[in-house]
């Protein structure tokens, strides 16, 4: 990559993501203690609608901007970079304002017919200002990803989370006293103000960069705004349509879960509690390590686009192969961690909520969920959004079938089985597409065999490692944290020992 390493960019995003996730967990722990599992369930009910609108608007334009900016940077057409971001900003904000107006007009049927809980009304109402703000931020982030400068986006994410936590903590006493629905609305207020601060940081840096870029008098490769807008739409529309379809299916899936629990014999309050434990407590813990793969997926799009524009196919295959290998390593390590410490992690983070059994079952999703993120970034970089959509739809159909037919019989465990099976199917289909298009060879030994051996070794060694750290009498909470960190360090050490991770290759990727 010209001058920069996509892995270095991913590491910056990972560090920021780690800080954001830690702050996010502090926030979730505080929020769950504030509003309880039922309150978390109510708050999570609006998540499908939020994801449907936001991902549809923001994902396509962000990827389109990063691809176009990376391609223009590779060709040294620097005059177009700010123009691309400005055009994208105008397009996405216009779309977001229309979406916000549509939700405002139909808010009553959304709350009462689709979500079937009137307590979500104020949360939905307060969600509306977030939509144009997040959409605008996605366009600016796409610019930074394209020029492979991820520091501004990393800083803005940290600021957003700090502001969100601060708002909720400052206003908690007043909102909790006046009812659960208002307490849930408070979480949305925090989210809205946090997103505004995120955008403010991004725009401030963007305006400074824009002023500097105007000093560059070179008009090499100049593109008219009409051409830029046309190209942005051509790239973003298929991706946004993909996200709309997958988000719609994801929304149907999540909205159905509490209803299927009701059919299975639970009362409404109990079904909301179980739903809150799964989606608001257990899933964020299992998805925590995915900050690595999501960072990798984000930086892979411009990295692959740049290499393709320069026809460096060997570099493309190398980056893809190593990204997949690292994702498998991460997946196997954290599978072993969640298998060995599911109860301890659940009790450490959410005391008295008893989510250990859910965490244990979700541990088997780690490999496939993380791999799906990396493969999505690869397919977007290769321009295969249509194939990605087809494969994702197949996965969602499997999951929805499990929701409808297995949850009433087996409860939440039936849904988790659906996640494992559907994610595995999607990963197999995506890997097949990548290998067919690039001609890249499957490296089963370094992708699966070696990391799998380490995973099995860690699972069997857990109790011995635990016994060792217990000797020091550090207290239960500290012992759990040290145990987890010890297992992660030992796992990565074993990866080096058996050759799953090569030191020279790591240094090469990092430059």
Image (spheres, rainbow, N blue to C red):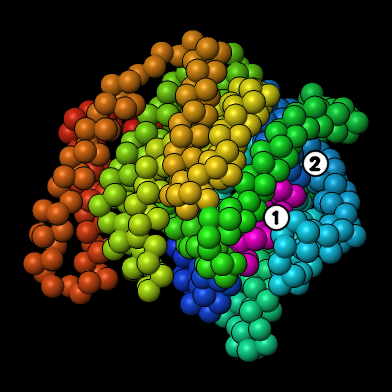
- In the picture, the quarter occupied by the C terminus is top left
In the rendered image, which quarter is residue 233 located in? top right
Any magenta on residue 48?
A: yes
Magenta residues, as a range? 41-53
Residue underneath mark 1: 50
Label 1 vs 2, first from the N-terminus: 1
Residue underneath mark 2: 88
Q: Is residue 110 above or below residue 314?
A: below
Residue located at (85% from left, 33% from top): 229
447 horizontally vs 276: left or right: left
In this view, the residue in front, 299 or 277, is 277
Any magenta on residue 297?
A: no
Residue located at (80% from left, 41% from top): 88
Mark 1: secondary structure: helix
* Residue 141 can be seen in this image: no
Q: Is residue 245 above or below residue 436?
A: below
Q: Position of residue 396 (x, y in %)?
A: 60, 36
In the rendered image, which quarter is residue 216 located in? top right
Q: Position of residue 185 (x, y in %)?
A: 69, 73
In this view, the residue in front, 285 or 265, is 265
Majority secondary structure in the magenta region: helix
Circle 1 Cα neighbour tier, 10 Å, few/some/many (<14 / 14–19 / ≥20): some
358 horizontally vs 165: left or right: left
């Amino acid at each position: 990559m010209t001058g920069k390493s996509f892995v270095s960019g991913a590491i910056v995003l990972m560090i920021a993501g780690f800080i954001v996730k830690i702050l996010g967990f502090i926030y979730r722990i505080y929020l769950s203690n504030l509003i309880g599992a039922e309150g978390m369930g109510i708050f999570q009910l609006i998540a499908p609608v939020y994801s449907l609108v936001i991902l549809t608007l923001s994902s396509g334009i962000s990827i389109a901007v990063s691809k176009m900016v990376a391609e223009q940077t590779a060709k040294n057409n620097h005059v177009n970079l700010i123009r691309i971001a400005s055009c994208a900003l105008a397009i996405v904000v216009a779309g977001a304002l229309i979406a916000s107006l549509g939700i405002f007009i139909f808010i009553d049927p959304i709350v009462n017919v689709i979500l079937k809980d009137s307590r979500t009304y104020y949360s939905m109402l307060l969600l509306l200002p977030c939509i144009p703000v997040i959409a605008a931020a996605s366009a600016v982030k796409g610019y930074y990803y394209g020029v492979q400068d991820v520091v501004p986006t990393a800083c803005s994410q940290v600021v957003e989370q700090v502001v969100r936590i601060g708002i909720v903590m400052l206003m908690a006493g007043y909102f909790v006293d006046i009812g659960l629905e208002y307490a849930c609305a408070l979480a949305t207020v925090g989210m809205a103000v946090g997103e505004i601060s995120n955008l403010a940081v991004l725009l401030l840096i963007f305006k400074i960069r824009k002023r500097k870029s105007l000093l560059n008098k070179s008009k090499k490769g100049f593109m008219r705004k009409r051409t830029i807008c046309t190209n942005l739409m051509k790239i973003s529309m298929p991706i946004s349509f993909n996200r709309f379809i997958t988000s719609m299916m994801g929304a149907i899936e999540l909205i159905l879960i509490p209803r299927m629990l009701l059919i299975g014999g639970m009362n409404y309050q109990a079904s909301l509690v179980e739903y809150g434990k799964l989606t608001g407590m257990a899933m964020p813990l299992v998805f925590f390590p995915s900050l690595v793969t999501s960072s990798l997926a984000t930086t892979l799009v411009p990295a692959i686009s740049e290499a393709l524009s320069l026809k460096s196919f060997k570099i493309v295959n190398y980056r893809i192969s190593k990204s997949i290998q690292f994702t498998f390593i991460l997946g196997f390590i954290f599978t072993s961690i969640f298998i060995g410490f599911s109860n301890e992690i659940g009790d450490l983070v959410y005391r008295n909520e008893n989510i250990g059994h859910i965490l244990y079952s979700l541990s088997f999703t780690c490999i496939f969920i993380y791999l799906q993120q990396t493969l999505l970034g690869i397919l977007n970089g290769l321009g295969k959004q249509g194939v990605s959509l087809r494969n994702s739809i197949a996965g969602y159909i499997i999951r929805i079938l499990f929701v409808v037919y297995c949850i009433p019989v087996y409860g939440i465990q039936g849904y988790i089985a659906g996640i494992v099976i559907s994610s595995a199917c999607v990963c197999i289909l995506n890997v097949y597409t990548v290998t067919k298009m690039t001609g890249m060879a499957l490296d089963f030994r370094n992708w699966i065999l070696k990391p799998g051996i380490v995973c099995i070794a860690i699972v069997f060694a857990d109790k011995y490692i635990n016994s060792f750290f217990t000797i020091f009498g550090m207290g239960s909470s500290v012992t759990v944290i040290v145990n987890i960190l010890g297992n992660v360090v030992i796992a990565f050490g074993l990866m080096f020992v058996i050759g799953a991770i090569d030191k020279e290759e790591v240094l090469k990727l990092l430059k």
